[in-house]
Image (spheres, coloured by chain):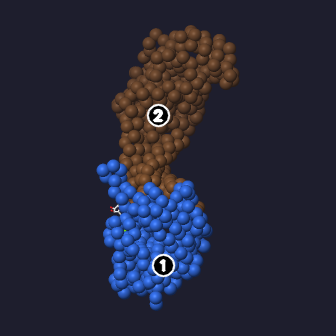
Chain colours: A brown, B blue
Amino acid sequence: MTGLLQIALKLLANDRGKFFTLIVGITFAVVLMLLMTSLFAGIMQRTAANIYNIGAKVWVMDPSVNTQTDNIPMPDYILDVVRSIEGVSYAVPMYSGSGLLKLNDGRYQAANVIGIDDATLFGRPNMLQGEIADIYNNDAYIAIHDSEFSKLNNPVLGSTFEVNDYRGVVVGIGEALMSGLFGTPTLYTTFNRAISDLPQMRFTITYILVEPKNVADVAHIKQTVSEAGYLALTQKEFIKKNTHYYMYQTGLGTNVLIMTVISFIVGLSIAGQTFYAFVLENIEEFGALKAIGAKKQELIEMILFQSSVVGFIGYGLGMLIAMVLIALAKYRLANYAALVTFQSLAFCFLMVLAIVAFSSYLGIRRVTRIDPFDIFRG
Amino acid sequence: MLQAKNITKWFGEGEAKTYALHDVSFEVNFGEMLYIVGPSGSGKTTLLSIISGILRPNEGSVTVLDKDLWQMSDSDLADFRLYTLGFVFQDFHLFKKLTCKENVAIPLILQKKPMDEALAAALKELKMVGLERRTELNPNRLSIGEQQRVAIARAIVTEPTLLILDEPTASLDGETGKRIISFIKENLLNEKRAIIIVTHDNRIYPYASRMIRMEDGRITEKAGNLDED
Ligand SMILES: Nc1ncnc2c1ncn2[C@@H]1O[C@H](COP(=O)(O)OP(=O)(O)OP(=O)(O)O)[C@@H](O)[C@H]1O
Ligand SMILES: [Mg+2]
């Protein structure tokens, strides 16, 4: 660090009040922006929980599907169409729907029921208790141990309930890689039991899960499925479609965006204003530097350095505080949906850079306009 | 060492055009302590700014050490102020948030001298002006007279060939004023340096080598060699 930058740093840090206000302003903005975007990312991830949990590489669905919970059945022949596409290693049907459970205590509870292919059990959960093979037993269901598990009255192996007046028995407890957002517990069963126990429309297949022979075949599969009038998406694309829907077709995205923009503006105005006040307070000294022989470039460097220092400290602190808050919230609330993504971090960093740039611009504009003659005249 | 020739400076244009300096010529030599005196508004500060490379004259030229000041680029003018000139502003303009030592080191820091070297030199100058026990304080903890001395230390830390002081005794009482001027004359004036002092204060006139009097932007009197002690 050059001597002049050391001086710039001392000028800034020795002005305790403003230094503190600047850092607090930026920290505050970073915390808010990071919380908002992380919450959004977390919620988005949760809405796609089943897409992650099932784990299929390619999903075939009706083109009207917006989110994974849109259960739009497809006719059986589509399964044969998909199976006959070159490059498909195997394709299995999947049922997704909601069932009304009557629990032992007489309480009713809606549940998300997933029916996996009888032959392959593709998309099956990891078992925490019980054996996956027991899914073939009479009336067998597997309860998923996610954050909604207690809504099933914390069942154990052998617990029974009714699904649409059919008997159901818990034969296993499965692990949830990710909990859903919608507050309903999840049960897995076989595809055939699902379509016999739950009320059906004429068609029964909600999704076809496809394992391509290799990645290069995906384009061809998508093409052929689309010619048949249906939609094939990779896991990533499906998650994206799902997110897009919540982001643009519901108020969720807009609200998060508005909150983020407000946080940004608050940070921007606190930091911009304080920094400008700081420059103004030192304006005579900057002018004196110019009169003594500092070049314009050197004054600009000082200002940029000062605003960058507060920007980076604010970003670091804000990031730390936001992460601690999120970690605490997750620790207290198992169901808390927040995900600090690289994108959120990068986004907040860019916003901080914008705040730094704006503040510097104000300061630089003021400093370069000082006429040292005014300093001479006092 | 410095020649100012036919300097004219006006502000504004048309109706609002006011002349601050009219055809002003003078020179300063090494080893001299030149006073510029005159009533308020007579153009003294304007003249100082022009010979310091701060304010461009409308007419005339300034030659310092055989170089025409107003033919230089902005960056060379800044370097001229940084390396050749030492300036004590009327209201000092010390950095409130820095220590006295850091304040004095600033011109050397601008010269890109290493920090420790600059601070060591600053300490030496502060000792010279008798402030060795104030080096770590902020200037606003000091008396006006002490602040004046910090400003002087800052002006001389680069060992400038031309030292300029604008109203150095204006905010000091008579005794302190005299003491500081005699200090400057005894310790800072030498054969390799010229000093220009702008002042109203007739109590310090006896210390001048030479004086020029200004009125309404013109030099009305040049008084030679008052140096008779
Ligand atoms: N930027 C400016 N615009 C217009 N007029 C100016 C400007 N600067 C100085 N003047 C005018 O030029 C004249 C000389 O001003 P200057 O400050 O040089 O006087 P001075 O002798 O230093 O006075 P003082 O003893 O009060 O410091 C004054 O009439 C002043 O009003
Ligand atoms: Mg003046």
Q: Which residue is label 1 attached to?
A: B33
Element under disc 1: strand
Tell me where residue B228 appears, x and y as whole percent: 46, 88
Image quadrant for the N terminus of chain A?
Answer: bottom right
Q: What subunit carries mark 1?
A: B
Residue lying at 42% horizontally and 57% vertically, measured from the top left: A371
Tell me where residue B66 appears, x and y as whole percent: 59, 66
Q: Along the line of sight, which residue is nearer the eye, B107 or B61?
A: B61
| Whether residue A66 is situated above or below residue B109 in the rendered picture | above
Is the residue at mark 1 in contact range of ligand 2, meaning its CB lies under 8 Å from it?
no
- Cα distance, mark 1 to mark 2? 79 Å
Residue lying at 50% horizontally and 16% vertically, measured from the top left: A62
The kind of residue tagged 2 is Met
Q: Residues within 10 Å of mark 1 (few under 14, many from 20)?
A: many
The kind of residue tagged 1 is Met
Q: Along the line of sight, which residue is nearer the eye, B49 or A295?
A: B49
Q: Which residue is label 2 attached to?
A: A44
Image quadrant for the C terminus of chain A?
Answer: bottom left
Asked if residue A169 shows in the view, the reply is: no
Task: Give the quarter of the image for residue B118.
Answer: bottom right
